[in-house]
Image (cartoon, rainbow, N blue to C red):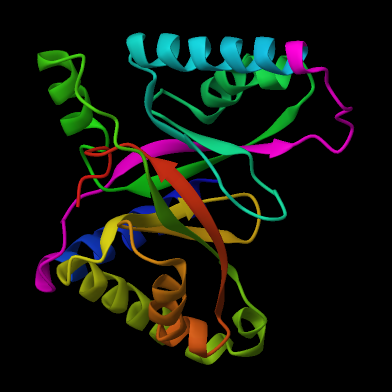
């Protein structure tokens, strides 16, 4: 564990230096991203029960935001549905994030399960949103769909170990370029117990355009990373870029 933490510290330092040299943000913040995934055991609901659970879910979202735990949330709009929605927490530990997420009414009622990861994202996610809504609670949400890219280890991760580090460096440089071009709302790497390596969240552009841009990523072209695409609905001013 100590070796892993040391290696992570070295990696983050290298990423910070690389970012400064390429005009990208020099720091990241640790967040906990929660994916609410449909429970395979969920059963059909009556309209009344569905409305009751949804109302309780929304009330819980507002409470978590008021408590300073939740800094972003929104549903996914995919067919077929593999993720119902996501929470982004600013809390002290992975265990705390898992405990809070498990208390959501959709989870308690057996509609969703929780999948939680540490995400090293850009600072100030949600800051402008909360500032504006504190000044004027009637500020419009203006929910829009953002292409939400989950980056996993691809087949080339193990097949091309000698090329992997160079391709990952090229990937980070490419993501920096997308940010500088004004394409991205946020991006960052994950600390995951599985093959999830990072998130790239676009501004509200067509999903096809996001797919075209990600297909030009050197690590994606080489198969070291593969992209899972989603559509995430988020309010204005949540993402910092």
Q: Position of residue 146 (x, y in %)?
A: 40, 54
Residue 24 visible in the current orientation: yes
Residue 153 sits in quarter: bottom right
Q: Nearer the viewer, residue 48 or 77?
A: 48
Residue drawn at x 25%, y 72% as measured from the top left: 178
Does the segment drawn in magenta span residue 55?
A: no
Q: Position of residue 23 (x, y in %)?
A: 10, 68
Residue 3 visible in the current orientation: no
On screen, residue 111 versus residue 114, left or right, reads: right
Relative vertical location of residue 100 with respect to residue 7 in this rendering, above or below:
above
Residue drawn at x 39%, y 37% as measured from the top left: 31
Q: Position of residue 19 (x, y in %)?
A: 18, 66
Q: Nearer the viewer, residue 188 or 201?
A: 201
Residue drawn at x 27%, y 64% as measured from the top left: 15
Relative vertical location of residue 12 with respect to residue 118 in this rendering, above or below:
below
On screen, residue 141 versus residue 44, left or right, reads: left
Does the segment drawn in magenta span residue 22?
A: yes
Please report the bounds of the magenta region as a residue range: 20-48
Q: Nearer the viewer, residue 218 or 48?
A: 48
Q: Position of residue 52 (x, y in %)?
A: 67, 9
Residue furthest out toward the front: 47
């Amino acid at each position: 564990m100590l070796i892993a933490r040391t290696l992570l510290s070295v990696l983050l330092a290298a990423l910070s230096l690389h970012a400064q040299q390429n005009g990208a943000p020099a720091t990241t913040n640790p967040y906990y991203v929660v994916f609410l995934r449909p429970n395979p055991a969920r059963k059909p609901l009556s309209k009344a029960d569905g409305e009751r659970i949804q109302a309780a879910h929304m009330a819980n979202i507002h409470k978590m935001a008021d408590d300073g735990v939740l800094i972003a949330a929104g549903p996914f709009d995919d067919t077929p549905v593999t993720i119902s929605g996501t929470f982004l927490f600013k809390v002290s530990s992975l265990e705390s994030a898992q405990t809070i997420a498990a208390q959501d009414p959709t989870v308690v009622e057996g509609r969703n399960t929780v999948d939680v990861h540490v995400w090293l994202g850009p600072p100030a996610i949600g800051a402008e949103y909360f500032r504006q809504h504190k000044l004027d609670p009637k500020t419009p949400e203006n929910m829009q769909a953002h292409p939400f890219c989950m980056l996993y280890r691809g087949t080339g991760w193990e097949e091309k170990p000698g090329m992997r580090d160079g391709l990952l460096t090229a990937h980070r440089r490419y993501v920096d370029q997308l940010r500088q071009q004004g394409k991205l709302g946020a991006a960052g790497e994950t600390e995951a117990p599985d093959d999830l390596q990072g998130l790239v969240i676009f501004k509200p552009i067509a999903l096809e355009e996001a797919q075209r841009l990600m297909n030009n990523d050197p690590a994606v072209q080489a198969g070291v990373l593969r992209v899972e695409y989603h559509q995430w609905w988020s309010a204005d001013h949540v993402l910092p870029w």
